[in-house]
Image: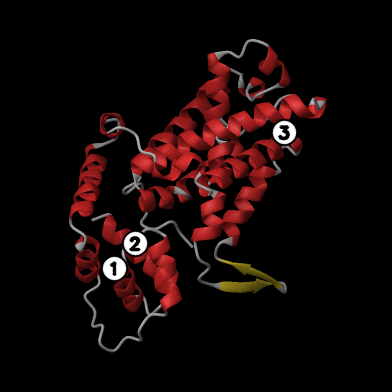
């Protein structure tokens, strides 16, 4: 299972976040501050330095955590493609702030010396993303290994589990706080799912990426003014005959519509994918990246 087209097509915000996370991890690692990152009980009632706050949001404290974390961030770019870069930026900000507040509350309530320094890194964003991953991304294939049943989503769950259990309580607590933040976003508290950044702010961040990203964002905005754009791209990219295909099941069409695609494009993609919902999702994502 993959997150759609390779690379960061229509995912400039994810690209910036991944690069920033890698750079901050390397910089803090070189300076020997990796082990001092992360929120602690003393930070709540003492002076919380700006460098430590930034590091706790972006920088992982070890190379294995960096590898698993960047892999998950890269995979979850599929959500930016579904809801758009503007709304995904709101999702990132909401996840980071809310998970941080939950961490502060947990440290203040627990007062547990074994978790006096939580793991640093974008745990809030990563584990908040598991909520839409669990609810919105369908399972397309299942298989058995030594009698144990797995699906094509199992590898993402295993990577998340490895990150969650990397330092026991110190990593489990930030992960749980991220899941709670993702749940609140899913519940649309304060109508957060409708929130957007002003266009000036969105255009500023778009200029931080390469010209090809700006071009793809412009095409995405143009797609909003032409409802049949995605449909035409599906037809152009996969010009096979539809007359001999079996009509897609209504529940499969509804699943793709719930992921943000229009109904007609979803139906045509399912026809071309022979009703394989995962392949149809990739077809739609590829059509958006043109």
Compared to 123, does 268 lie above or below?
Answer: below
Looking at this view, is 112 or 69 the one in front? 112
Q: Residue at x 39, y 47 (%)?
A: 80
Please say if the residues under marks 2 and 1 sit with CB atoms less than 8 Å apart. yes
Please say if the residues under marks 3 and 1 sit with CB atoms less than 8 Å apart. no
Q: Which of the 4 image quarters holds residue 231?
A: bottom left
Q: Residue at x 66, y 49 (%)?
A: 161
**What kind of element bears circle 1?**
helix
Q: Residue at x 27, y 54 (%)?
A: 289
Compared to 122, does 223 lie above or below?
Answer: below
**Res. 61 in view:** no
In the rendered structure, which disc, 3 or 1, sits on the residue that comes first in sequence? 3
Please say if the residues under marks 2 and 3 sit with CB atoms less than 8 Å apart. no
Q: Residues within 10 Å of mark 3 (few under 14, many from 20)?
A: many
**Residue that label 2 marks:** 261
Whole-angstrom CA distance, mark 2 to mark 1, is 7 Å
Q: Residue at x 66, y 47 (%)?
A: 162
Q: Which of the 4 image quarters holds residue 197?
A: top left
**Res. 17 in view:** yes
Whole-angstrom CA distance, mark 2 to mark 3, is 39 Å
**What kind of element bears circle 2?**
loop
Q: Percent position (x, y) of residue 16?
A: 39, 35
Which residue reaches farthest front? Answer: 190
**Residue that label 3 marks:** 170
Q: Residues within 10 Å of mark 1 (few under 14, many from 20)?
A: many
Q: Of the numbered discs in the image, which one, if any, rests on residue 265?
A: 1
Q: Percent position (x, y) of residue 55?
A: 55, 23
Looking at this view, is 226 or 237 the one in front? 226
Q: Percent position (x, y) of residue 119?
A: 66, 31
Whole-angstrom CA distance, mark 3 to mark 1, is 45 Å
Q: Which of the 4 image quarters holds residue 135?
A: bottom right
């Amino acid at each position: 299972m993959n997150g759609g087209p390779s690379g960061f097509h229509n995912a400039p915000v994810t690209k910036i976040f991944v690069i920033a996370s890698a750079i901050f991890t390397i910089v803090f690692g070189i300076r020997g501050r990796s082990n001092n990152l992360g929120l602690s009980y003393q930070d709540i009632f003492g002076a919380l330095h700006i460098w430590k706050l930034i590091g706790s949001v972006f920088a992982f404290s070890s190379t294995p955590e960096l590898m698993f974390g960047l892999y998950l961030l890269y995979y979850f770019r599929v959500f930016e493609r579904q809801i758009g870069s503007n709304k995904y930026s709101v999702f990132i900000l909401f996840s980071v702030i809310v998970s941080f507040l939950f961490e502060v509350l947990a440290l203040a309530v627990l007062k547990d010396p074994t978790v006096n320094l939580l793991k640093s890194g974008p745990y809030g964003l990563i584990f908040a993303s598991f909520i839409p991953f669990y609810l919105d991304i369908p399972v397309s294939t299942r298989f058995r290994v030594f009698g144990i049943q797995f699906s094509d989503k199992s590898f993402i769950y295993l990577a998340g589990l490895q990150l969650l259990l990397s330092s026991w309580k110190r990593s489990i607590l930030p992960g749980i706080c991220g899941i709670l933040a993702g749940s609140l976003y899913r519940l649309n508290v304060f109508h957060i799912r409708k929130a957007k950044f002003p266009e000036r702010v969105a255009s500023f961040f778009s200029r931080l990426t390469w010209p090809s990203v700006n071009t793809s964002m412009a095409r995405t905005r143009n797609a909003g003014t032409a409802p049949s754009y995605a449909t035409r791209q599906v037809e152009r990219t996969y010009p096979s005959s539809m007359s001999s295909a079996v009509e897609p099941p209504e529940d499969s069409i509804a699943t793709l519509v719930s992921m943000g695609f229009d109904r007609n494009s979803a139906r045509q993609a399912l026809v071309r994918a022979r009703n394989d919902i995962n392949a149809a999702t990739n077809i739609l994502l590829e059509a958006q990246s043109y």
